[in-house]
Amino acid sequence: MNEHENDALHAAFQAVLSADPEPTLPSVVDAAVVGGFRIRRRRVALATAGALIVVASMAAVAVNLPSLGGERAPVPLAPASTAHPTPHTPEPARTAAEPLPSGD
């Protein structure tokens, strides 16, 4: 490097150093405090949302349950069927000599 290049380089460094000072970095403590506020705010929001969901689901269940003190509605029964009016009793065993009953 010659002396002219050294002077130009020196002038460039002087210009950088004489420029506006660099902004200060935030302190680690301040960043931790701000982060802690955010975490607490998120926890409170999530806890509130969870509580609202639980209350809403409990209300939905309570609305769908029948009242405990009131009268119950009768349960509908199936209509009486004529297919099996009485329990079937087995017929006595037939021998080969007995004729089968006719369908008349």
Image (spheres, rainbow, N blue to C red):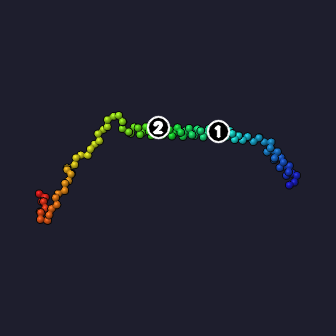
Left or right? Give the position of 88 relative to 52. Answer: left
Q: Where 43 falls versus 85 (above or below)?
A: above
Q: Position of residue 76 (x, y in %)?
A: 28, 42
Check contact, mark 2 vs mark 1: CB within 8 A.
Answer: no
Q: Amino acid at mark 2?
A: Val
Q: Amino acid at mark 1?
A: Val
Q: Residue 6 at what x, y percent from top left?
A: 85, 51
How much space separates mark 2 and mark 1, taking CA atoms? 32 Å
- Estimate the x, y position of residue 13 in percent, counting from the top left: 81, 47
Instruction: Name the residue tied to disc 2.
Output: 55
Q: Give the quarter of the image for residue 92.
A: bottom left
**Residue at x 16%, y 60% (from the top left corner):** 93
Judging depth in this view, the residue of 17 and 102 nearest the camera is 102
Q: What element does badge 2 sit on?
A: helix
Give the position of the N terminus as an image quadrant.
Answer: bottom right
| Residue drawn at the location 63% of the way across and 39% of the way down | 36
Give the label on residue 34, or none.
Answer: 1
Q: How many numbered discs?
A: 2
Q: Nearer the viewer, residue 82 or 9?
A: 82
